[in-house]
Image (tube, rainbow, N blue to C red):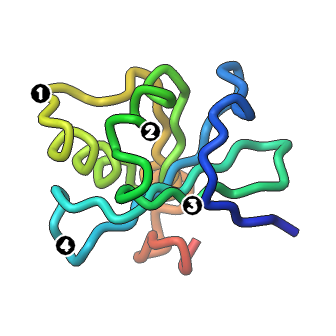
């Protein structure tokens, strides 16, 4: 069972472990990030951070050096890059579970989270 918190506690994260990331936007606009969800293995808390309370740049400064794991990483990366006006991949270390699912399950047909 996980607890959901809306209080940003960056000191809870271990740089040596992957950080799971999910972004919610307002509609399909990559430049309008509504919230960022963060989870790290071994914790019982999922942090759901409203970008009105915690600006995306503040979140990014804390997590930019982590190995980020996301389903369809290119979406999360595009959101950070567009919103923060970055002209590069925002994270040096990342894993994309969407891509991994396509490699591991080539005949599945659909690779959204509900399908895999």
Question: What is the quadrant of residue 58 in the picture?
Answer: top left
- Mark 1 vs mark 3: which is more N-terminal? 3
Q: Residue 87 has which mark?
A: 1
- Quick one: label 2 or label 4, which is nearer the N terminus? 4
Per the model, the C-alpha gap separating discs 1 and 3 is 26 Å
**Earlier-in-chain disc, 3 versus 2:** 3
Of marks 4 and 3, the one in the foreground: 3
Classify 10 Å Cα crowding around label 4: few (below 14), some (14-19), many (20 and above): few
Image point (38%, 28%), residue name: 91
Q: CA distance from mark 2 to mark 4?
A: 21 Å
The residue closer to the viewer here, 67 or 8, is: 8
Q: Quadrant of the C terminus?
A: bottom right
Q: Nearer the viewer, mark 1 or mark 3?
A: 3
- Measuring 25% from the left and 50% from the top, which residue is drawn there? 79
Q: Which residue is found at the position 22% from the left and 47% from the top?
A: 78
Residue 43 falls left or right of residue 55: right
Tell me whether the residue at label 1 lies in contact with that at label 3, contact meaning CB atoms closer than 8 angstroms: no
Q: How many marks?
A: 4
Residue on which disc 3 sits: 48
Task: Look at the numbered disc 2 and give the secondary structure of its residue.
Answer: helix
Q: CA distance from mark 3 to mark 2?
A: 11 Å
The residue sitting at 15% across, 67% down in the picture is 29
Secondary structure of the residue carrying numbered label 3: strand
* Mark positioned earlier in the residue sequence (1 or 2): 2
The residue under label 2 is 59
Q: SS of the residue at dot 4?
A: loop
User: Marks 4 and 3, Cα distance to the nearest angstrom?
Assistant: 19 Å
Q: Which mark is residue 28?
A: 4
Spatial separation of the CA atoms under disc 1 and disc 2: 18 Å
Percent across and percent down for residue 82 are 15, 45
């Amino acid at each position: 069972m996980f607890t959901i918190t809306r209080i940003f506690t960056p000191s809870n994260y271990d740089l040596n472990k992957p950080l799971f990331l999910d972004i919610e936007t307002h509609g399909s606009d990559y430049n309008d990030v509504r919230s960022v969800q963060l989870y790290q293995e071994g914790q019982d808390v999922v942090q759901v951070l409203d970008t009105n309370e915690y600006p995306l740049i503040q979140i990014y400064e804390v997590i930019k050096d982590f190995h980020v794991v996301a389903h369809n990483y290119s979406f999360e990366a595009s959101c950070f890059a567009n919103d923060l006006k970055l002209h590069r991949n925002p994270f040096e270390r990342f894993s994309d579970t969407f891509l991994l699912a396509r490699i591991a399950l080539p005949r599945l047909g659909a690779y959204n989270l509900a399908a895999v």
